[in-house]
């Protein structure tokens, strides 16, 4: 498998709707307590959601004053995205959102996780607000609330304004301040509608793939740039947390990290230590910093503070006790020690199956591979439902039983409308995928995990990053020639589950 292919595969792998007369605070507390009460598999108040991201669904890439993002620039560069696809139109949700909200209602959703495009709100990433961009999100969130759906906002899902990349991108620590200003603008203007904020989607993924190995925009490949970018993001997370809370007293701030449960390849001490480094780097590098104000032990040697650009006092900036912890689960990893002559082999790197260039990452020195024991989705990811239980229980143990949100979970299968059956999309494998994962999730809830919400990825087939439109993660099929949406059989099943809040439907 070529490296780009594996990385784009591993990319995926790596808060009430109860409005009525109750306040948002009550709704959130209610769902949390009921979940904690345990017993029932999915207690009343459990939130059934789906997720999307701005660049993947909105389209309207240069409409109403929106600025260019690094994903616009990347997709407009020949040879970067499969099939030369772009997000210029995507699912056109910028224009079709009323129809999509009606669809969510039909699917019985009680939470919708979407992201805001920074370049719509501040076209070059700093300075004056583009009112038209902000107004779009006011209309979107008003529509959601009217439909009884909780708006869950991801502040940043990878589409950095190109203007900020031109100033050095995430390795430039000034971006922490710009980002906090942007987050504050959102909280000030939308904080009456949105109570649940996740600062970053999968921070390891966009910093590592964008700056460490260059397969995502801005296509830079220098491990030290990755270390700097990741440190800026940790600072940004802390500063934004404070800016959001200062602007909106009801706001709760959590996360949307990408996580994969990791298992040592052998029982050797070296492989176990490598697995701990994987956890620290890929699962907790942005979580432990927020909760404890320090970097987890991700490196074979000392933490490389100098290369990160760490300054005295940064530990205080990073430390913010998240109100809840959100993470995605797609697939698992088997980890071995990658130091020459030890354990699993001689390749170096982070989450790369085989890296011929070698030696790029002398810092973490583990080898993480996705096993293929379970069936593979059409995107090539192993289906391993047990992983969601292990991950949820691990976070529960490690962070003293926090409130948890599953921010993404899903699979790509390429099933299309079947004309012989009235245009249905019979995607039985996806239904099976969700059934199995939700069974494991309910087991974790029964074992005491305080899981409050589950978001299936995704509401719609959409622009799947460097894979373009060649992967379909939607529970709704999208015909990109005419934007026609057809709920797949899995979506019809999910709607019943969400309506009944139990799996036997
Ligand atoms: C996750 C991303 C999301 C989508 C899914 C398939 O890693 O957060 O945008 O691409 O994978």
Image (cartoon, rainbow, N blue to C red):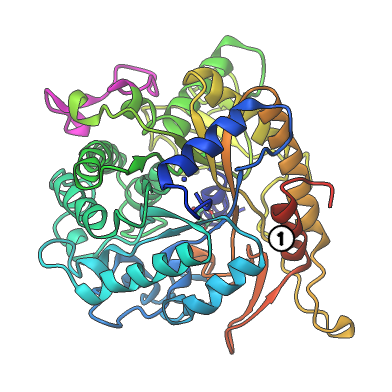
Judging depth in this view, the residue of 218 and 203 nearest the camera is: 203
Residue 302: in magenta span? yes
Point 67% across, 37% down: residue: 43
Judging depth in this view, the residue of 399 and 29 nearest the camera is: 29
Point 77% across, 43% down: residue: 436
* Residue 123 in the figure: left or right of residue 52: left
Residue 483: in magenta span? no
Judging by the rendered image, the residue that carries numbered circle 1 is 495
Q: Measured from the top left, where is residue 318 in percent x and y? A: 24, 30
Q: Is residue 115 above or below residue 421?
A: above
Judging depth in this view, the residue of 250 and 483 nearest the camera is: 250
Q: Measured from the top left, where is residue 397 in percent x and y? A: 55, 18
The reply to whether residue 457 is visible in this rendering is yes
Q: Measured from the top left, where is residue 413 in percent x and y? A: 72, 63
Residues packed near mark 1 inside 10 Å, few (<14), some (14 to 19) or many (20 plus): many
Furthest-top residue in this view: 269
Furthest-front residue in this view: 21
* Residue 410 in the figure: left or right of residue 98: right
Q: Measured from the top left, where is residue 59 in percent x and y? A: 42, 77
Number of marks in picture: 1
Point 66% across, 30% down: residue: 445
Q: Examine the image and state in which quarter residue 251 appears.
A: top left
State the SS at label 1: helix
Range drawn in magenta = 292-314
Q: Secondary structure of the magenta portion, mostly?
A: loop
* Residue 371 in the figure: left or right of residue 365: right
């Amino acid at each position: 498998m070529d490296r780009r292919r594996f990385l784009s595969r591993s990319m995926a792998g790596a808060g009430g709707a109860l409005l009525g007369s109750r306040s948002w605070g009550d709704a959130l507390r209610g769902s949390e307590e009921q979940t904690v009460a345990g017993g029932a598999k999915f207690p009343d108040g459990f939130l059934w959601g789906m997720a999307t991201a701005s660049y993947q669904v909105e389209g309207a890439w240069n409409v109403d004053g929106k600025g260019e993002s690094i994903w616009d620039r990347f997709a407009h560069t020949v040879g970067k995205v499969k099939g030369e696809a772009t997000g210029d139109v995507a699912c056109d949700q910028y224009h079709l959102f009323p129809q999509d909200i009606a669809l969510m209602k039909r699917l019985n959703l009680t939470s919708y996780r979407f992201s805001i495009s920074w370049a719509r709100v501040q076209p070059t990433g700093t300075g004056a607000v583009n009112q038209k961009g902000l107004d779009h999100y006011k209309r979107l969130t008003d529509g959601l609330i009217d439909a009884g759906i909780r708006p869950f906002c991801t502040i940043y899902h990878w589409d950095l304004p190109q203007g900020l990349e031109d100033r050095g991108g995430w390795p430039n620590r000034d971006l922490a301040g710009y980002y906090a200003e942007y987050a504050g603008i959102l909280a000030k203007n939308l904080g009456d509608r949105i109570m649940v904020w996740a600062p970053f989607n999968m921070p390891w993924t966009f910093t590592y793939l964008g700056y460490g190995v260059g397969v995502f925009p801005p296509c830079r490949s220098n491990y030290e740039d990755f270390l700097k970018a990741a440190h800026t993001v940790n600072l940004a997370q802390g500063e934004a947390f404070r800016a959001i809370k200062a602007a909106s007293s009801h706001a709760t701030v959590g996360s949307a990290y990408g996580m994969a449960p990791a298992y040592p390849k052998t029982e050797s001490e070296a492989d176990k230590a490598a697995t701990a480094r994987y956890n620290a780097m890929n699962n907790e590098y942005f979580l432990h910093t927020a909760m404890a104000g320090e970097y987890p032990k991700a490196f074979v040697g000392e933490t490389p503070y100098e290369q990160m650009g760490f300054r005295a006092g940064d530990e205080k900036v990073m430390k913010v006790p998240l109100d809840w912890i959100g993470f995605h689960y797609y697939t698992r990893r088997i980890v071995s020690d990658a130091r020459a002559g030890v354990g699993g082999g001689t390749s170096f790197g982070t989450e790369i199956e085989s890296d011929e260039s070698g030696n790029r990452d002398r810092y973490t020195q583990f080898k993480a591979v996705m096993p293929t024991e379970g069936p593979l989705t059409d995107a090539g990811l192993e289906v391993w439902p047990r992983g969601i239980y292990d991950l949820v229980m691990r976070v529960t143990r490690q962070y003293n039983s926090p409130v948890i949100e599953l921010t993404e979970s899903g699979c790509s299968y390429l099933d299309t409308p079947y004309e012989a059956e009235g245009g249905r999309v019979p995607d039985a494998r996806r239904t099976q995928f969700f059934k199995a994962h939700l069974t494991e999730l309910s087991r974790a809830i029964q074992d005491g995990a305080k899981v409050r919400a589950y978001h299936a990825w995704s509401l719609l087939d959409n622009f799947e990053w460097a894979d373009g439109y060649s992967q379909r993660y939607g529970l709704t099929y999208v015909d990109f020639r005419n934007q026609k949406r057809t709920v797949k059989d899995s979506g019809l099943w999910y709607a019943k589950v969400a309506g009944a809040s139990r799996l036997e439907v």
